[in-house]
Amino acid sequence: MTNAVSLGRAMWRGFTMKCPHCGEGRLFGRFLKVADHCAACGESYSAQRADDLPAYLVIVAVGHAVVPALLAMETAYAPPYWVQALIWLPITLLSSLALLQPVKGAVVGLQWQTGMHGFQESKQRRVADARRLAQASI
Ligand SMILES: [Zn+2]
């Protein structure tokens, strides 16, 4: 397998909760627990350090969708507050839960592709493999 995985592809594979390296194996063992390694290609993910970034990104994304919609509804219809809460709290909760795992996967894909944190060794190995393949094809 060549190591020509672009940043966008690695992040997309992570967003779809697949291994950024091969795109086949599952990235997560449980809801927000990244697997130690890919079952398909063996790439290690124990070095990932997504920390709080996925949560911050989800807050920004959901907030930018929900708050304007809530304000538009308030401006147009001025429903009672309990109606607003009944509508927007579940939407906020469900959309946040739905986005958290894919966004975390994209962040892990970003870290893996760029060699951040504990992925430096993996990145160096992939670059060396790509160079070896390029020299072999000359
Ligand atoms: Zn894999």
Image (cartoon, rainbow, N blue to C red):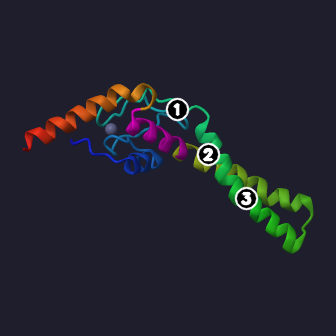
Occupied quadrant, residue 4: top left
Q: Can you tell which of label 3 and label 1 is closer to the viewer?
A: 3
Q: Residue at x 84, y 56 (%)?
A: 85
Instruction: State the image quarter where residue 72 is shown.
Output: bottom right
Identify residue type, mark 1.
Answer: Lys
Q: Which residue is mark 1?
A: 33
Specify the amino acid type for callout 3.
Val
SS for callout 1: loop
Image-quarter location of ligand 1: top left
Residue 73 x, y percent position in the rendering: 82, 69
Q: Mostly what secondary structure, the magenta segment?
A: helix
Camera-side residue of 132 and 71:
132
> Tag 3: Cα neighbours inside 10 Å, few (<14), some, or many (≥20)?
some
Element class at badge 3: helix
Q: Is residue 18 magenta?
A: no
- Residue labelled 2 has its Cβ within 8 Å of some atom of ligand 1: no
- Decide if residue 32 is on the left or right side of residue 67: left
As measured in the structure, the alpha-carbon distance from the residue carrying label 2 to the one carrying label 1 is 18 Å
Q: Earlier in the sequence, mark 3 or mark 1?
A: 1
- Which residue matches tag 3? 66
Q: Which residues are magenta?
A: 103-115
The residue closer to the viewer here, 24 or 61, is: 61
Tell us which disc is closer to us: 2 or 1. 2
Residue 116 is left or right of residue 4, and the answer is right
Which residue position is annotated with label 2? Answer: 57
